[in-house]
Image (spheres, rainbow, N blue to C red):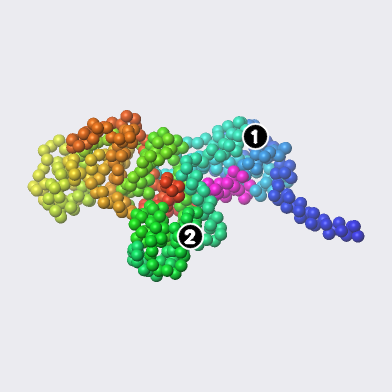
């Protein structure tokens, strides 16, 4: 009878033992990777699917420690679990843990006690994964210039081998891992939002789709209003924000409560918060959850491309968000609307340092703009150049005597533009009253504009690449590190004379394309339209 009971008990005992082994492999398996077996693994990189650079990193790492193991040791080291947890957490950083062979490493972990070869393979591939992930968190997973041909900010250099050696030497592996990703508030908010949206996706949350229609204005009655009510309830539930007392009912009246919610939604998506539900607002409402998850991932990647230290005082120009922000000691102290380049003259991403301002500037018109933009206007209106304050000079000789525009048959100019065109300072000048200069290879600068009404548009892509400013004088005060503009500065500005003002210290500036960013007052992630298709192109390149 006892023997029979033992037979019944044995399978259950074996089952629970297997569960224990499965979930506690580091406790139950004696894992040993000896130096000779590690060297054998490194001698056959093809079997491990290692790249040339990956193999070189491993050889350099193990050469400094005489091929002694780090992770797969006897007695069992807790470092292996630390490393595997680090790799598994790649998902929280918007990366894919399978790019670092997490599943394969976990399988090797279960079998490493069965052969020295498996133990050595686990050792080597864990090191390889840690080096790759450390580098990806420190400088970005993608090659920035390949993912975005208009990104010209150099990615930081990072020696992953030296990083890992130092972390092990100082016995601070986990703290070192924690310091790799960007620590700025925007990155951390994107990370938290990504986790939350993935949880919603895991719960099979689907947002209401709203059919296209003519614009719906506050006070209208429309059959799509009940769907919009549902969508707003979903939007604010997703962000954990009060729902503005929206009743998810069949009421078709676009009432005050719903208008308030729609305005907040528009502001969060970089749109004019006028409450009018037009095509851009509908497009933002109909973006699926899966797209926003991908949008968060690619923008976390862009933030990894940036330098970790942007400076004590700097400017951040977000072309996708049509916004310039000034920061001092990591606090946003100024922000304004901007106008950026048209889609066919898109503003690139690059960095530099403001060096000087020009008050009451001339505008030396680029040939491409003179030919494509201004010549047709002169052909339609013979007084356009004269009334706009433009001077015409022969060839590229701006020192010659100006030519009377009425003496030129503008309709005969079909190809090329054989003149140099310059606009005098004044109320019609396209650069307004002030421009901000910094050395760059794109001939891009920041400037005032007489066309103030364009700042009220949703999609502000009207320039030829340069940045037009909503609040140029406030930027001038920040650039001079002054609370208010000096009296002499204002006098020079009002003199209408062209005067150069050098900054007391170069001011770092970063022009970036970030379509998911944190709004400082609300602390909510704002999602901007992909105006230049750079999200789509980068996501296609990343295969995310």
Disc number lying in front (1 or 2): 2
- Front-most of residues 317 and 243: 243
Q: Residue furthest left?
A: 407
User: What secondary structure is found at the residue carrying circle 1?
Assistant: loop
Residue named by callout 2 = 234
- Vertical order, 472 against 244 (above or below): above
Magenta stretch: dominant secondary structure: helix
- Front-most of residues 337 and 388: 337
- The magenta region covers 85-105
Instruction: From the viewer's perspective, tell me whether residue 314 is left or right of residue 391.
Output: right
Q: Earlier in the sequence, mark 1 or mark 2?
A: 1
Q: CA distance from mark 1 to mark 2?
A: 55 Å
User: What secondary structure is found at the residue carrying circle 2?
Assistant: helix
Q: Residue 47: within the magenta?
A: no
Instruction: From the viewer's perspective, tell me whether residue 457 is left or right of residue 402.
Output: right
Image coords of residue 509 (percent x, y): 36, 38
Q: Residue at x 46, y 44 (%)?
A: 186
- Front-most of residues 223 and 355: 223
Image coords of residue 299 (percent x, y): 45, 48
Instruction: From the viewer's perspective, tell me whether residue 460 is left or right of residue 55.
Output: left
Q: Residue furthest right?
A: 1
- Vertical order, 172 against 428 (above or below): above
Whether residue 134 is visible, yes or no, is yes
Q: Residue at x 49, y 40 (%)?
A: 183
Image coords of residue 164 (percent x, y): 58, 35
Residue named by callout 1 = 67
Q: How many tags in the picture?
A: 2
Q: Residues within 10 Å of mark 2 (few under 14, many from 20)?
A: some
């Amino acid at each position: 009878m006892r023997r029979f009971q033992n037979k019944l008990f044995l399978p259950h005992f074996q089952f629970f033992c297997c569960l224990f082994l499965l979930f506690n492999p580091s406790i139950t398996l004696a894992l040993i990777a000896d130096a000779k077996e590690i060297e054998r693994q490194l001698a056959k990189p093809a079997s491990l699917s290692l790249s040339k650079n990956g193999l070189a990193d491993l050889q350099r790492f193990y050469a400094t420690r005489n091929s002694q193991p780090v992770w797969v040791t006897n007695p069992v080291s807790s470092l292996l679990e630390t490393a595997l947890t680090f790799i598994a957490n790649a998902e929280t950083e918007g990366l894919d843990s399978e790019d670092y062979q997490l599943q394969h490493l976990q399988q090797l972990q279960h079998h490493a006690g069965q052969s020295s070869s498996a133990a050595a393979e686990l050792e080597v591939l864990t090191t390889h994964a840690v080096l790759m992930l450390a580098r990806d968190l420190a400088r970005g997973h993608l090659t920035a210039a390949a993912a975005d041909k208009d990104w010209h900010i150099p990615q930081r250099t990072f020696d992953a081998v030296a990083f890992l050696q130092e972390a092990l030497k100082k016995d601070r592996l986990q703290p070192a891992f924690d310091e790799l990703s960007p620590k700025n508030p925007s990155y951390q908010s994107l990370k938290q939002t990504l986790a939350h949206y993935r949880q919603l996706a895991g719960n099979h949350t689907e947002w209401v789709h709203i059919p296209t229609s003519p614009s719906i204005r506050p006070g209208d009655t429309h059959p799509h209003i009940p769907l919009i009510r549902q969508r707003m309830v979903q939007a604010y539930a997703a962000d954990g924000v009060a729902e503005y007392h929206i009743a998810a009912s069949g009421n078709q009246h676009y009432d005050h409560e719903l208008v308030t919610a729609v305005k907040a939604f528009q502001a969060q998506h970089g749109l004019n918060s006028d409450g009018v539900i037009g095509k851009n607002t509908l497009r933002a409402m109909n973006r699926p959850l899966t797209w926003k998850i991908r949008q968060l991932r690619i923008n976390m990647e862009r933030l990894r491309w940036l330098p970790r230290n942007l400076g004590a005082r700097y400017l951040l120009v977000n072309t996708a968000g049509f916004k310039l922000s000034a920061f001092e000691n990591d606090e946003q102290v100024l922000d304004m609307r901007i106008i950026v380049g048209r889609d066919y003259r898109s503003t690139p991403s690059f960095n530099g340092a403001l060096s000087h301002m020009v008050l009451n500037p001339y505008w030396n018109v680029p040939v491409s703009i003179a030919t494509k933009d201004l010549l047709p206007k002169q052909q339609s209106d013979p007084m356009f150049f004269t009334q706009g304050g433009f001077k015409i000079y022969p060839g590229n000789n701006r020192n010659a005597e100006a030519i009377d525009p009425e003496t030129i048959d503008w309709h005969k100019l079909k190809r090329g533009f054989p003149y140099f065109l310059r606009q005098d300072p004044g109320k019609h000048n396209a650069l307004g009253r002030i421009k901000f200069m910094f050395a760059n290879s794109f001939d891009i600068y920041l400037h005032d504009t007489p066309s103030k009404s364009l700042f009220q548009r949703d999609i502000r892509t009207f320039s030829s690449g340069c940045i037009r400013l909503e609040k140029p004088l406030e930027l001038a005060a920040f650039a001079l590190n002054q609370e208010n503009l000096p009296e002499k500065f204002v006098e020079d500005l009002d003199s209408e004379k062209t005067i150069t003002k050098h900054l007391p210290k170069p001011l770092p500036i970063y022009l970036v394309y970030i379509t998911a960013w944190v709004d400082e007052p609300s602390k909510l992630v704002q999602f901007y339209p992909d105006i230049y298709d750079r999200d789509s192109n980068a996501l296609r390149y990343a295969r995310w």
